[in-house]
Image (tube, helix red, strand yellow):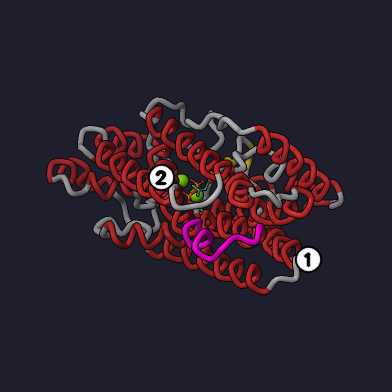
């Protein structure tokens, strides 16, 4: 499970500033938007993406007042994608609270998500910089296409690892890349630093999503007592990397037999638990963890190429935070 990452002094203070900024944004809303966002945007969340942004922006010209609206835009865009994602994943819990479509309905959740998407662009437009708006638009496109891929590939149990990686590059790495790249651009960094930040974000995003997929099938967690439901990927038929690896095992395929039901049927809790325990009888968890270590290692190699000691140590801390979570996931 994730614990709060050890933040360097500037990050701790500046993420608190971000929290105040986001609270100010929500308090100026009213009605359903205010109610819905108090239970999602203000319900916690690790704030990893704005942390990456601030770390990448850290140089001698670092000006937190200037950077905070962009940090908020990144977290707001991320939250929008979660609200939409929970609709398609039929997920009932997010950040320890009932999801918006669970409290209200799917139409409401869609529009709350749309509002956040739009607001993130509004925040970034104040920088009057076409490059960051282009990066942001490209990311939003990829997020949507990644989620389409998720819908299209549901219950396709024979899908290859390549299809999985293509999907997570779009739905997860895109926003990690954006967070790093915006930090690079808004701090006036040289081209090579920005491109290395992009690479770093891609590797970290891949590792992060595989770990998230492992958390979904972790067996040491009560199903409904977390910030989001455990086993939901299996119940919904989302084919994640550990499942892809398990399906390579002939015995596993034979044992699960007819458990993976028809395309429109949700797999019940008991069957999902059974599938999860069978995954643990294969090498799938170990192999998936090895993939995470591989990508974290690639990310760490790229850190060496990025200028600035505070950046380097901040990015290493984020990698170690993920590593710690991977090691704890059973
Ligand atoms: C969840 O992201 C979505 C994934 C890409 C797996 P986080 O795990 O960063 O969610 P919060 O922001 O902390 O709630
Ligand atoms: C990440 O995938 C979702 C987005 C990038 C929007 P998941 O579906 O695994 O995320 P969680 O597990 O619901 O947070
Ligand atoms: Mg989901
Ligand atoms: Mg997940």
Quarter location, residue 160: bottom left
301 or 244, which lies in front? 301
Magenta segment, principal secondary structure?
Answer: helix
Quarter location, residue 275: top left
312 or 152, which lies in front? 312
Quarter location, residue 311: top right
Label 1: state its secondary structure: loop
Task: Tell me the residue at 77%/54% (across/down).
Answer: 66
**Mark 2 vs mark 1: which is more N-terminal?**
1
- CA separation, marks 2 and 1? 33 Å
Label 2 sits on residue: 300
In the image, the segment drawn in magenta is 187-197
Q: Position of residue 253 (x, y in %)?
A: 18, 46
Dot label at residue 63: none
Residue 211 lies left or right of residue 56; in this view the side is left
Label 1 sits on residue: 126
Q: Position of residue 167 (x, y in %)?
A: 40, 61
| Residue 99 highlighted magenta (yes or no) | no
């Amino acid at each position: 499970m994730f614990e709060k990452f050890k933040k360097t002094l500037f990050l701790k203070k500046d993420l608190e500033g971000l929290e105040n900024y986001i609270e100010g944004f929500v308090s100026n809303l009213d009605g359903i938007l205010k109610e819905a966002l108090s239970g999602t945007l203000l319900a916690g969340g690790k704030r990893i993406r704005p942390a990456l942004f601030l770390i990448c922006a850290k140089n001698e010209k670092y000006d937190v007042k200037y950077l905070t609206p962009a940090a908020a835009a990144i977290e707001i865009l991320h939250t929008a994608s979660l609200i939409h994602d929970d609709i398609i994943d039929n997920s009932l819990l997010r950040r320890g609270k009932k999801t918006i479509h669970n409290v209200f309905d799917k139409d409401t959740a869609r529009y709350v998500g749309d509002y956040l998407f739009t607001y993130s662009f509004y925040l970034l437009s104040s920088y009057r910089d076409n490059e960051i708006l282009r990066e942001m638009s490209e990311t939003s496109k990829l997020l949507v296409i990644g989620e389409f891929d998720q819908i299209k590939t549901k219950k396709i149990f024979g899908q290859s690892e390549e299809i999985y990686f293509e999907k997570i590059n779009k739905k997860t790495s895109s926003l990690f890349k954006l967070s790093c790249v915006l930090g690079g651009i808004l701090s006036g960094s040289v081209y090579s630093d920005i491109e290395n930040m992009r690479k770093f974000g891609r590797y970290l995003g891949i590792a992060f999503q595989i770990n998230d997929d492992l958390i979904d099938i972790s067996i040491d967690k009560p199903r409904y007592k977390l910030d989001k439901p455990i086993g939901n990927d299996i119940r919904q038929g989302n084919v994640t990397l550990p499942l892809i690896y398990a399906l390579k095992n002939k015995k596993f395929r034979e044992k699960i037999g007819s458990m993976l039901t028809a395309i429109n049927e949700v797999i019940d809790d008991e069957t999902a638990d059974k599938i999860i325990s069978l995954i643990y009888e294969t090498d799938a968890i170990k192999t998936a963890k090895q993939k995470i270590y591989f990508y974290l290692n690639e990310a760490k190699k790229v850190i060496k190429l990025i200028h600035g000691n505070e950046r380097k140590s901040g990015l290493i801390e984020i990698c170690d935070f993920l590593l710690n979570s991977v090691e704890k996931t059973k």
